[in-house]
């Protein structure tokens, strides 16, 4: 965490190896063997509190909080799709300034 705070970036595997005094292969192996679900599980206890806070902000008019709340709870997104069936009839009217130029195409 110290590296991230100081450098303002996520370290590479090589940088982690240097900080820890090991090899990149060891770091890579540990990363590939890490069970992310096991690490995240304890934080899920706080999910309800976070959602309640988000809901409170949304109900007070915070548009970003409302969008995030609806996205998380209702799987909503801003993408709008319209399914339209049928035909569209187009009528084109042409007006000629000089009537002598007018030719009736139907004759």
Image (cartoon, grey):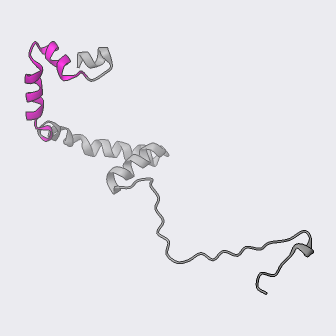
Tell me which corner region of the image, top left, top right, bottom left or bottom right, holds residue 105: bottom right
Q: Would you place residue 27 above or below residue 68 in this image? A: above
> Camera-side residue: 77 or 93?
93
Q: Is residue 25 magenta?
A: yes
Q: Would you place residue 101 above or below residue 12 in this image? A: below
Estimate the x, y position of residue 40 in percent, counting from the top left: 17, 38
Q: Which residues are magenta?
A: 11-37
Estimate the x, y position of residue 98 in percent, counting from the top left: 92, 70
> Camera-side residue: 43 or 12?
12
Estimate the x, y position of residue 17 in percent, counting from the top left: 14, 17
| Quarter of the image with the C terminus in it | bottom right
Of all residues, the one furthest to the bottom in this rendering is 107
Residue at 12% x, 30% y is 31
Q: Would you place residue 105 above or below residue 45 in this image? A: below
Estimate the x, y position of residue 72 in percent, counting from the top left: 33, 50
Residue at 81% x, 81% y is 104
């Amino acid at each position: 965490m110290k590296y991230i705070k100081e450098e303002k970036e996520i370290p590479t595997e090589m940088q982690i190896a240097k900080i820890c005094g090991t090899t990149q292969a060891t770091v890579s192996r540990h990363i590939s063997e890490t069970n992310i679900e096991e690490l995240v599980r304890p934080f899920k206890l706080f999910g309800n509190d976070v959602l309640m806070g988000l809901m409170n902000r949304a109900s007070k008019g915070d548009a970003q909080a409302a969008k995030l709340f609806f996205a998380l709870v209702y799987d909503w997104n801003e993408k709008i799709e319209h399914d339209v069936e049928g035909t569209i009839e187009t009528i084109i009217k042409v007006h000629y300034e000089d009537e002598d130029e007018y030719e009736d195409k139907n004759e």
